[in-house]
Amino acid sequence: MIRRNLSLDVDGVLCNPVPSVLDIVNDKYGTHYQEKDIKKFDQCLDVPRLKILNTVIGTKKLQLGPLFRKYTNDYDFVMSLKPLDVCKESLWFLNDIWDINIHSTRPKESLPYLEEWFEVNDLPYNSITLDSGKDSGDVLIDDYDKNLLKFNNTKILFKHNWSINSTKTLDLIDEGEIIVCENWNQVYDQLDKIHHF
């Protein structure tokens, strides 16, 4: 049996750090952001610049990107993240016929935390690469469409509110070039079809 190479993103595919990051922002600034409020990958949040006696004096923009890099490089934050529903069971089934290669843009210093996270959560994988390039493998699963647009083989978009940032993505979805999944049951079904095709 030929083993195929499956490339997986971490954040937004294996786990979802967005609610945890928003909890931190809400606790710090007294805001009430929820996951449904995040519409774009590079979104900025309006937070109070200054608060005096419960009165907000001006606002400032808080970029989500730097926050994610900060917290995904924090041991306690990383270890608090839980795998998405059915992720573990799916990966163990897939591990029999796929080489599972993890690709993430997390900071390189966070690699030991990520390896420990996989071990603690009993998630199988063959390799972990922390870089911005996600151009290898037979299939790439990512929650950020711009990574998929650069990938030459089978593309699966693990869809969240923030996943589609380009009109080209919508065209490729319509043309069947990008497969859209919203949970690990759907991902598993798609990978099963691909493997047996």
Image (tube, rainbow, N blue to C red):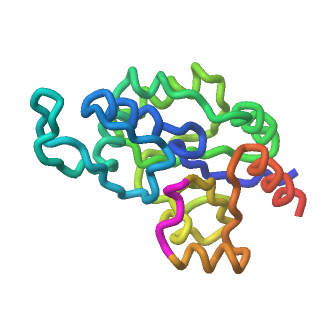
Left or right relative to 170: residue 131 = left
Q: Residue at x 79, y 53 (%)?
A: 191
- Which of the 4 image quarters holds residue 27? top left
Q: Nearer the viewer, residue 134 or 148?
A: 148
Q: Nearer the viewer, residue 90 or 164?
A: 164
Q: Is 175 drawn above or below residue 158 in the view shown? A: below
Q: Which residue is drawn at 19% across and 41% down?
A: 48
- Which of the 4 image quarters holds residue 68? top left
Q: Is 133 drawn above or below residue 82 in the view shown? A: below
Numbered marks: total: 0
- Which of the 4 image quarters holds residue 74? top left
Classified by dominant secondary structure, the portion drawn in magenta counts as loop
Which quadrant: the C terminus? bottom right
Q: Residue at x 62, y 53 (%)?
A: 158
Q: How far across and down, in percent of the image, does residue 160 sit?
A: 57, 52
> What range of the chain is rendered magenta?
161-166
Q: Nearer the viewer, residue 69 or 67?
A: 67
Left or right relative to 153: residue 71 = left
Left or right relative to 125: residue 76 = left
Q: How far across and down, in percent of the image, does residue 132 sit?
A: 41, 56
Q: How far across and down, in percent of the image, does residue 131 sit?
A: 41, 51
Q: Which residue is drawn at 26% across and 49% down?
A: 46
Q: How far across and down, in percent of the image, does residue 136 sit?
A: 57, 60
Q: Tell me, yes or no, whether the highlighted magenta stretch contains residue 196.
A: no
